[in-house]
Amino acid sequence: MKNYDLVVIGTGVGGTAAAFKCRKAGLTVAVIDKRIYGGTCALCGCDPKKVLVGATEIIDRAKRMKGLGIEGEILINWNDLMKYKRTFTKNVPKNREEGYRKADIDMYHGIASFKSENEILVNDITITFKNIILAVGSKSMPLGVKGEDHIYTSDDFLELDKLPKKIIFIGGGFISFEFAHIAALSGSEVHILNRSDSVLKMFDNELVTLLLKRSEELGIKIHLNNKPTEIEKTNEKYLIHAQENNENIIIECDQVFNGAGRVPDLDDLDLEKGNVKFNKHGITVNEYLQSVSNERVYSAGDASASSGLPLTPIAGKESGAVATNILKGNLRKVDYKIMPSVLFTHPKLAVLGLTEEKAIEDGFEISVNKIDTKDWYTYKRTNEAYAMIKTVVDKKTDKLLGVCIIGSNADELINYFALIMKFNLSYKEVKDVLYAYPTSASDLGYFI
């Protein structure tokens, strides 16, 4: 029997910050993970993905500038790129464990499950705790398709030693589009299968339409109203049986990936034994990220059914808040009002706050400023065919409700708008700032 003030399940961003903070405050702390230490973002998510995005960004820009001073052809050497990617991930588990060891945090490798409201079982060891943080992250969403065992995950894509010639992504969300753009610019034939007639629903419809046009120009074939019914393996190929617009079709490919999204990874925890309520979005928590049914239990990151988006910065904020609430009593809440999100395609798509459609649905009286910026100097100098920004303003308060941007610099530009909204800056204040020129920021005064 082991005894700890705090047990943290998960070694990603959602668990690590709290583990270190609580240990520094003098609590006895243990961490548990069934996977190698490090979490999704560092090992098989945001960070390694961005390495691949950065390489294909060079290919995309070179293609756009061909004949405008750039000659010849630049190609992705996939094997070399993956070797480079692994330089960012290979030392993460070792470094994370060394950090825990130096902090005198006990480590367990294995599947954890509740025995009771204050007991966890891991590797036949019973651990009791005063508090526990469930930061177990997420996993690929089950598709419920016959032959699903033939479908690979986003984790598998990020470990491919050889890029397949023809790839199918099932689902029309972040994972499918980001990896589809990487694969297409690396030389693969790519198809995206989406069950409904719309994709990327959290973004502005008009800007999504522009991204779809660009995706098709890159050779990505997008199948809407497509419902896969079976995945069949024949020799070295895969056959995807599907209904598309009520017609039965079969698409052959070299590999098929699940890009339908992710769900909280809760199946192993035996939450009922711990009296921990949950739903499809994760652990049911109150405003302090504490379980509504077991006061010893807190949750952060993708495993928590909080109001936050499943983003790494949100997991970090929640982890810090949970640590404070454990150490000082429930007093810290996370502010979810400002949550910029970026789709790392080519071009990028970014959103903050409400889209035009959502603002109308929520009953706001709005004014929308839509600016096609492809002919602005910022974008014309790199020959971008698709660049646009939409700002949504509340007519009653004259405050910014939301922004959606498409363009190569959308990922950086959206952060300026996050500052504007966070500090309630007026249009005049934004316009009065002197910005370095020519930069993306120097366009800010003309957007609102």
Image (cartoon, rainbow, N blue to C red):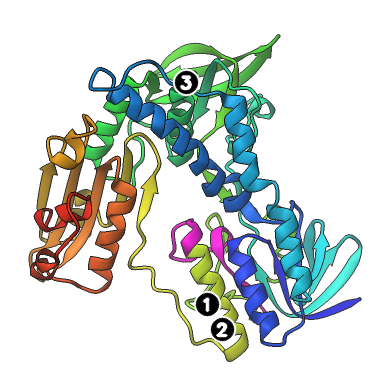
Amino acid type, mark 3: Leu
* Label drawn at residue 75: 3
The structure residue drawn at horizontal position 33% and vertical position 22%, both measured from the top left corner, is 63
Q: In this view, does 200 lie to the left or right of 127?
A: left
Residue 297 sits above or below residue 264 on the image: below
* Label drawn at residue 13: none
The structure residue drawn at horizontal position 33% and vertical position 40%, both measured from the top left corner, is 348
Magenta region includes residue 418: no
**The N terminus lies in quadrant:** bottom right
Give the extent of the magenta segment: 296-313
What distance separates the C-alpha of mark 2 from that of mark 1?
6 Å
Amino acid type, mark 2: Asn
The structure residue drawn at horizontal position 56% and vertical position 17%, both measured from the top left corner, is 240
Residue 106 at least partly seen:
yes
Q: Is residue 423 left or right of residue 99?
A: left
Which residue is the site of mark 2? Answer: 325
> Tag 3 or tag 2, which sits nearer the N-term?
3
Q: Mark 3 or 1, which is nearer the eye? A: 3
Q: Tell me if mark 3 has few (under 14), some (14-19) or many (20+) residues whose alpha carbon lies within 10 angstroms of its own.
A: few
Residue 127 sits above or below residue 257 on the image: below
Q: Is residue 37 left or right of residue 278?
A: right
Q: Tell me if mark 2 has few (under 14), some (14-19) or many (20+) residues whose alpha carbon lies within 10 angstroms of its own.
A: some
Find numbered disc 2 in the image and state the secondary structure of the residue it sits on.
helix
* Label drawn at residue 321: 1
Q: In this view, does 169 lie to the left or right of 203?
A: right
Q: Do the residues labelled 2 and 3 touch (CB within 8 Å)?
A: no
Counting from the top left corner in percent of width and height, residue 343 is at 38, 43
Counting from the top left corner in percent of width and height, residue 211 is at 29, 33
Residue 323 sits above or below residue 145 on the image: below
Q: Are marks 2 and 1 in contact (CB under 8 Å)?
A: yes
Amino acid type, mark 1: Ala
Find numbered disc 3 in the image and state the secondary structure of the residue it sits on.
loop
